[in-house]
């Protein structure tokens, strides 16, 4: 399902940017254009969320899976309410960083960093001191 064509049929405003489209919508805080759509895939840069057409319908219009499928297939029972997408409020827990316990034998760490991560031995020695 081409999400851009579906949204145009439903009256949403889209703006072409290269090969992708921006979804333009308004809410209480003003104009928003952080949602990019390419074919059936979408990504909201503001909220760092994306997915396919079904996820779009579920996330922005609050539909369950069956209702979203029926809408996308054109078997709609009721028209979609023309409302702005919901803002995703996700609180990220910030984990406090703790240094690992000091190790007396750094040979394995040096070997890993040099051979697996291809870091110069001079750089590792500088930071180890």
Image (spheres, rainbow, N blue to C red):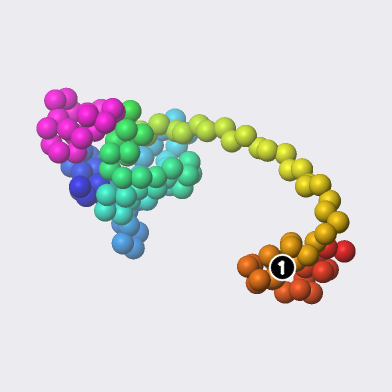
Q: Is residue 129 above or below residue 24?
A: below
Residue beneath the point at 36% across and 34% down: 59
Q: Is residue 99 above or below residue 29?
A: below
Specify the quadrant of the image occupied by residue 84. top left
Q: Is residue 34 above or below residue 109?
A: above
In the rendered image, residue 112, in percent from the top left (x then y), is placed at 68, 65
Secondary structure beneath dot 1 equals: helix
Indicate left or right for 128 with 95 as reference.
Answer: right
Task: Report which residue position mark 1 lands on.
Answer: 111
Taking the magenta stretch, the answer to whether it contains residue 68 is yes
In the rendered image, residue 62, in percent from the top left (x then y), is placed at 33, 28
In this rendered view, identify the residue nearer to me: 10 or 108: 108
Indicate left or right for 3 with 78 as reference.
Answer: right
Provide the residue span drawn in magenta. Answer: 63-82
Residue beneath the point at 66% across and 71% down: 115
In the rendered image, residue 97, in percent from the top left (x then y), is placed at 73, 43
Specify the quadrant of the image occupied by residue 122. bottom right
In this rendered view, identify the residue nearer to me: 14 or 80: 80
Q: Residues within 10 Å of mark 1 (few under 14, many from 20)?
A: some
In this rendered view, identify the residue nearer to me: 19 or 12: 19
**Residue 121 seen from this side:** yes
């Amino acid at each position: 399902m081409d999400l851009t064509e579906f949204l145009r049929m439903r009256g949403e405003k889209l703006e072409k940017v290269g090969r992708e489209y921006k979804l333009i919508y308004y809410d209480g805080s003003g104009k928003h254009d952080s949602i990019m759509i390419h074919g059936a895939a979408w990504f909201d840069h503001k909220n760092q969320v994306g997915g396919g057409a079904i996820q779009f319908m579920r996330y922005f219009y609050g539909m369950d899976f069956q209702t979203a499928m029926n809408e996308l297939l054109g078997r709609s029972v009721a028209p979609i309410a023309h409302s702005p997408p919901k803002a995703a409020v996700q609180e990220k827990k910030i984990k406090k960083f703790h240094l690992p316990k000091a190790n007396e034998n750094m040979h394995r760490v040096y070997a890993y960093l040099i051979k697996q991560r291809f870091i110069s031995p001079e750089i590792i020695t500088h930071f180890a001191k």
